[in-house]
Amino acid sequence: MANHETLPAETSISREEVLRRKAFLEFTEDDVAVLEGVNDLATQYAESMIEDFYKHLMAFEETRTFFADPELLRHVKEMQKAYFMRLTQGHYDQEYVANRIRIGQVHEHVGLPVKSYFGMYCFYLRAVLKRLREEYGEAPEQAFAIFNSLMKLTFFDIGLAIDTYIESRERTIEGQQEAIRELSTPVLLLRPGLLLLPIIGLIDTRRARQLTEQLLRSVRTNRAAVVVIDVTGVPSVDTKVANHLVQTVEAARLMGAVSIVSGIAPDIAQTMVRLGIDLRRIRTVGDLQSGIEEAERLLGYRVVKERPADGQGEKEGP
């Protein structure tokens, strides 16, 4: 498990957003005063609550697996105690928010499921309510007021933690998508001076830009003279993508490479004509084989079919 101090508290949550969230939860200065007023009580019960809390967690296999190491368990107990103690110490400012975000990053980093995260908060609130009933048995309204303020702050914390989960997962997904895009658009060197760019799947503006960058880098690296761009596996294109394809061909031409586009499907061809895309400077052929043959012709290659040696390749008689 990574130490939460090593994880950056990166967040897009501004001070104004923090204030908006507090306002939405109706978390006011009165609530702050209420929580600060029970800090001594929270200190008194912190140790026993943490023990009960982790006894509950260790009763379930799904959460027990995260704390198999005794030293790790001791460390996270100390962290959790500090976390709960902080709930009643006031000053719920940007520093408080950054601290809560770091804790959310720790839970996401170790892979703690969101459902377990919610379950932990649920247990904590139930345990607090039990303690408040014991302490304020003759003043139930006061107990309710304390619990109400604490519940507002707890849901404020949950919102911050869930934001952290979402942002982290989005970064992970974005990284995976980037890796998939790179793997799905290889620029292949078929022979000296000849590159093949087979495009498969949907093309959005971002992927089209990435294709252009990859292709131009390969043209320079391989000193390519001809590029075959095969779009047989592209189901559809829009105006932006079509224009980007034209720009890619033009950019390659400026670097000294002739581009041949192969495999344009009939519906895509009709779409491009209907959109008024200028294709006059693009060489097009029907399929990939024709594209490679045209590229080899431009490079001066001539494919000659070799006659088989006598008796080879022929079916022998009975």
Image (spheres, rainbow, N blue to C red):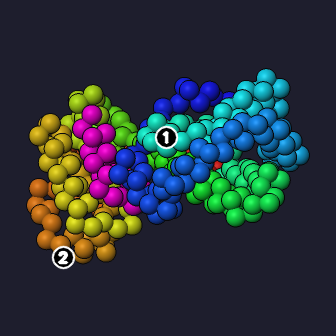
Instruction: Give neighbour class at mark 1: few <14, some 14-19, many 20+ (Cα, 10 Å).
Output: few
Residue type pointed to by label 1: His
Q: Which badge, 2 or 1, comes first in the chain's sequence? A: 1
Q: Residue at x 53, y 30 (%)?
A: 7
Which residue position holds label 2?
274
Q: Quadrant of residue 285?
A: bottom left
Circle 1 sits in a helix, a strand or a loop, which is it?
A: loop
Q: Residue at x 23, y 30 (%)?
A: 220
Quarter of the image where the C terminus is located: bottom right
Answer yes or no: is residue 195 visible: no
Image side of residue 50 versus residue 245, left or right = right
Residue type pointed to by label 2: Arg
Instruction: Give neighbour class at mark 2: few <14, some 14-19, many 20+ (Cα, 10 Å).
Output: few
Which residue position holds label 1?
91
Stretch in magenta? 199-217
Quarter of the image where the N terminus is located: top right
Q: Taking 217 as reference, is 119 above or below it?
A: below
Circle 2 sits in a helix, a strand or a loop, which is it?
A: helix
Residue 218 position within the rendered picture, expressed as x and y whole percent measured from the top left: 29, 34
Residue 224 position within the rendered picture, expressed as x and y whole percent measured from the top left: 24, 34
Q: Residue at x 66, y 33 (%)?
A: 82
Answer yes or no: is residue 282 visible: yes
Q: Taking 238 as reference, is 92 above or below it?
A: above
